[in-house]
Each structure stands twice: as C-alpha cells, then as structure tokens.
Image (tube, grey):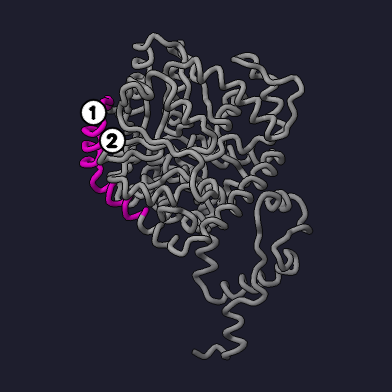
Amino acid sequence: MPSFPTAAKRELANSQLRHNLAGATATIRRKRAGVVGELDDWAELREAGAAIKAHTLSNLDTYLERFEAAVTEAGGTVHWARDAEEANRIVTDLVRATGEREVVKVKSMATQEIELNEALAEAGIDAWETDLAELIVQLGHDAPSHILVPAIHRNRAEIREIFRREMGKVGAPAPEDLTDDPARLAEAARRHLREKFLRAKVAISGANFAVSDSGTLVVVESEGNGRMCLTLPETLISVVGIEKVVPSWQDLEVFLQLLPRSSTGERMNPYTSTWTGVSPGDGPQDFHVVLLDNGRTGALADEVGRQALRCIRCSACLNVCPVYERTGGHAYGSVYPGPIGAVLNPQLRGTESEVDKSLPYASSLCGACYDVCPVAIDIPDLLVHLRTRVVEEHSGVRDKPLDALMGLASWVFGDAKRLAVAQKVASWSRKLIGRHGTIGRLPAPLSRWTDARDAPAPAEESFRSWWERTRGGQS
C-alpha cells in the first residue's frame, strides 16, 4: 500500500464513492443520535464501558486464563496464536482434520486482519462469507471499506451488477430479472447462501465479546446469517482477539447497550447469539477458540496506546470523521479504517511501511471521534502520541513542505504584530470565502483543494481586535 496521502488522492477522484459515503454516514449518524439521546444515563454508560475495558486490559492475563479454563471445562478447545501466520496455520489444520474443503463464515474483523480467507484458499479450502455486505465485497473481488458496513462504498445499482455477474460462478445464480430494489437484492443473497448453509460442515466466526467467567462467546448481528453459521455446522472455529474478553455477564450488559446504539443506531441488535462450549445434541459438537495476539500485547505495553484496545468495533468514529467521509476505507490500507484504524494499525503492525507511518497524520484532530466513542478512547490524543513515535522512529525522514509550513507558523505566532496582521487578513478573506464557508469563487488550482474539504469561514472579527476595540487594550 502507498502512504495515506497518495491513496487518499486517488480515492478523492472517485465522485461516486464520495456520494455513497456521504449519504450512508449521514444516515447512520442521524439514527445513532436519536437512540443515544433517549438515554439519560448515556454518559454514565460510556464511563462504565471505558472503566471495564481499562480494568480488563490491566489484568488481561488473569481474565484470559480464566476464559481458557471455562471453555475447556465446557468441552471446547483453546488455541493461542502469536501472530497471523500461526493463527492461519491452526485454523487450516483444524479444517483439514475434518476432511472438508469448504467453510461458511460469520463476519469477522479478526479473520480479515490475518487474511484467513487467502490462507485457506492456498490450502484448497473455499471460505464463503455469509454477511450480506461481506458477500458483496467477496463477490466483487473487493476489499472492505467500513467496520460495520464493509460495502458502504457500493450503491444498489453496483450491487445488482455484481450479483448478476458473479453469483452463478460460485453457487445459485441471481434471478435474470433482478432489480436494485433492496428487498430483491436481499432475496437473491438469501437464495444464494441457503445451499451453502445447509451443506457446510464447518463454520468460522469471530466474536464481539468473550465472557471470562463462563467461557461464553457473543456475536451480535442484524441478518441471522451468523445464527445459521453458529448452529448448523458440526465444527465451529472462532478466531478472537485477546482484547475482546470481558470479566462477567454483568459487564457484558453494559456493552450490549453501548454497541448497537453506537453502530447500527438500534436499541438492541436483532440477533444476539451466545454459546458456551459444546452441548450434546445441540449445535456444533467440535468447538475451538483461537485467541489471537498479532501485535496486541505490544500495544498493551504502551500506557497511552493501549486504550485503542478498548475498541468494540462500533464504527461510530468513522461515521463522524470528515477525512474518512471523503476518502473511504481503502485509503487506510487495512481492515480497520477511519480514526480507530489510524491509531490501531500502527500499533499492531509497526510504523515501518509507508501506509502505517502516515496513518497518524490521517486526521484533522477535530475531536469528533472522541465525542462519539462509546468507550471514550481519546483518539486525538493517541494520534498525537503516535505522530511523536513516528518522528522518533524515523528521525532521518523529514517532510519538507510540512517543516516549511510549521516554520512559517512559528514565525507568525512568535510576534504579536505579525499575528495581528495575519488575523486581519483572515477576517478580510471572509468576503471571499462566504459566511458559511462555501468557496465558489477561488480560481484554479486553489479550487481543487477546496473541492473535497470544508473551509469554515473565519470570524468577522478576531478576539484581539474585539478586545482592543471594546477595552482599548486595557485588562
């Protein structure tokens, strides 16, 4: 992947992408605001979620060992994976041991993170995504661009064409008269997936939460495909990041209020599936949990950076981020896009690659992401922290244009008279920009810069000018 600025420049040229993202994120924001506003104790719930996560991460070894013991006692098997390679090898060997050559999958960020589908394909095993959005991405030979809605960058017409072109190659074809009506698209997906559900003997899932006390895994979803994967197959393999553990069912209750409101804008998820080990005669009879590290203990060692591990993958920060809304998720070079990806990816993967080195700068530091985060991750603070880390780890690499800009800012701010002149110029520019920040008169090439950016109009009068005018400069 190229650096974020390079990838973002490419994505900004896609006007259809920006149109799709603007409409989808605005809808999700509006729904979220409505259901969050119904709760008088939302702030207290948020504080509770942050406190539970912080406590759990501080005692993660204890809760993970307790979880392993509970799963084992319930008839399951726990595997520990240091990295993606080890996790993929464990899962591949488990599938091979069943003699099967295909699996159905519940939507899982962890398996996308380790590129499990690709590893299974190399072993001759077909992995079928069953979440509607993930199915669209898979059939379109695409990559996810959103945590909650992986195909958010596609509109209905594009989805119809993908279904008509690709479904018949790997299973039940789409109807010849398929339209872009959402109900018809969902029906086509349901018919396509039904034969896979009924045929599959092995399923792979992730988990939204793992309850330490009982060894229970939890998946929340909106479609029911997860429930099909979790109950019909004979073997179930769950790949779970070690940060997903919560101490008890009482703690889980907090997150089952925070997550649906922050993610889908619902009071509760239509489907909440929980399973504990093996139940004779009911559901999968061979159950495995793969606990995934893959850089998480490294992030845990950073006292500032570890708060990113609180993330419950709600995607609220993506939906309010002005940078994500214009570039989409592909520019981030990871299954974790948006503000949380900008602070999580460099910690999980390091800052050696061009994309990971640039991600902490993929933000305006407006703070909207922190305001909506249901577990109070201070993403702006983390971004600054990681920018410092990038500079320290790559001290020989300088951004000359940025250095020049910062040098100019230092020169202006370093003298009261120069600052006063700059503020007067900014106030004068209001006539050019307009009262509402709408720039329509700028000549090229300046207009190209404002095409994908908001430019709030400067104040009509600076505080300094107001103070001198009303107080005569006297305190």
Q: Position of residue 255 (x, y in %)?
A: 40, 49
Q: Position of residue 291 (x, y in %)?
A: 31, 31
Quadrant of residue 300 within the rendered picture = top left
Labelled disc at residue 215: 2
- Quick check: is 290 in the magenta stretch? no
Which of 239 and 84 lies nearest the eye of the viewer? 239
Q: Secondary structure at mark 1?
A: helix
Instruction: Kindly identify the residue that appears in the image at 47 percent across and 42 percent down.
Output: 341
For label 1, count other residues whose C-alpha is less than 10 Å away and answer few (under 14), some (14-19) or many (20+): some
Q: Which residue is mark 1?
A: 72
Q: Is 45 located above or below residue 18 in the figure?
A: below
Looking at numbered disc 2 in the image, what kind of residue is underneath it? Answer: Gly
Q: Position of residue 274 (x, y in %)?
A: 38, 36
Of labels 2 and 1, earlier in sequence is: 1
**Residue 88 appears in the figure:** no
Instruction: Kindly identify the residue that appears in the image at 57 percent across and 79 percent down.
Output: 464
Q: Is residue 374 left or right of residue 32?
A: left
Is most of the magenta stretch helix, strand or loop? helix
Q: Is 263 located above or below residue 454 in the figure?
A: above
- Quick check: is 77 in the magenta stretch? yes
Magenta region, residue range? 49-78
Q: Is 467 located above or below residue 307 in the figure?
A: below
Residue sticking out furthest to the front: 281
Which of 467 and 348 lies nearest the eye of the viewer? 348
Task: Confirm or deny contact between disc 2 and disc 1 (CB under 8 A).
Answer: yes
For label 2, count other residues whose C-alpha is less than 10 Å away and answer few (under 14), some (14-19) or many (20+): many
Which of 233 and 45 lies nearest the eye of the viewer? 233
Instruction: Kindly identify the residue that appears in the image at 31 percent across and 26 percent down.
Output: 279
Instruction: Kindly identify the residue that appears in the image at 32 percent across and 28 percent down.
Output: 289
